[in-house]
Amino acid sequence: MKHILILIGQRLALGLVTLFIVSALIFIGIELLPGDLAQAVLGQAATPETVAAFRQQLGLDQPAWSRYLQWLSNALQGDFGQSLANGRELSELLPGRLSNTLFLAVIAAVIAVPLALILGILCVLWRNSWFDRATNASALTAISLPEFFVAYVLIAVLAIELRWFPALAQVETASTTGEALYRSFLPALTLILVVVAHMMRMTRASLLNVMARPYIEMARLKGVGPLRLILRHALPNAIGPIVNVIALNLAYLIVGVVVVEVVFVYPGLGQLLVDSVIKRDIPVVQAVSLFFAGTYILLNLLADVVAIVANPRLRHAQR
């Protein structure tokens, strides 16, 4: 137990260092954007005096390293500043968008994760059958298609042709849960189709790798049934890589939904990030980018820790 706690502490420390490096890269990337931020926000009609006063108000007349340390210090205290577009505090603006993104991610995850595990197990149980071949072909097709293409096909068929669901997922604060689920169906279905294929294929590959081991053959010779052989003997030993892929796909559901949210005009963090980049709303871009990076790093750390705890060989390999 002590060794595991030390490994978890090492992973957390590594994650904090990674997040610090990512925060610096975010700041540098925004600094390298062409044009003057104050001029872009105020427009071409602004006088030089107005632009200079606005630059001073934003602290743009200070050195870059000083502004970065100030931004990082404020971010560590939970203060991300105000939006330049509407003057709202980000502590008030971000939670609503975050809850919408998490709502969409939870819907997709609740359906996609068990569906992928069940399909992966059934493919191993009926290996080389028509079901296995059809499922693999469908998964390869889904992986090969970009998210925006899947989204536009769903809009064309389910929204325009059949008129079953709205093409735009305009979820509002006053919407009931049922209405929000109805309006979020198409973006959620797009995410499910994309992530199920990855998780199903990894589940199938990991189980087949374990099923080739001698102790599985011994259990089979003792008369253990195929389904019990998979669930009781193979799945616990294949859970490490499966959890890794599930964690990566969960991270994608939160930080990689930018394209899907833009296609469906879904009011989440991804849509807010794109709108803020267009408006040069730098505080929002920095805050959302840092949140995405932190979430991705956290879920990867979680997957790493679960893999180490689930697989004793990984624990010994760390020594």
Image (cartoon, helix red, strand yellow):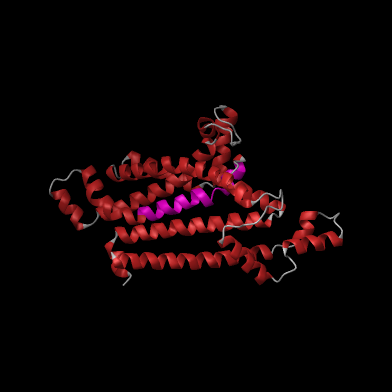
Asked if residue 50 lies in the magenta stretch, the reply is: no
Based on the displayed image, in which of its 4 quarters is residue 263 positioned? top right
Residue 136: image x %, image y %?
Answer: 39, 45
The quarter in which the C terminus is drawn is bottom left
Tell me: residue 57, above or below residue 124: below
> Where residue 244 sits in the image (x, y, percent)?
39, 56
The answer to whether residue 39 is left or right of residue 123 is right
> Is the stretch drawn in magenta largely helix, strand or loop?
helix
Compared with 271, 180 (above or below) is: above
What's the magenta region? 242-263
Q: Is residue 36 visible?
A: no
Q: Residue at x 64, y 55 (%)?
A: 285
Q: Is residue 246 magenta?
A: yes
Question: Which residue sits furthest left?
Answer: 222
Q: Residue at x 38, y 49 (%)?
A: 201
Q: Nearer the viewer, residue 253 or 193?
A: 253
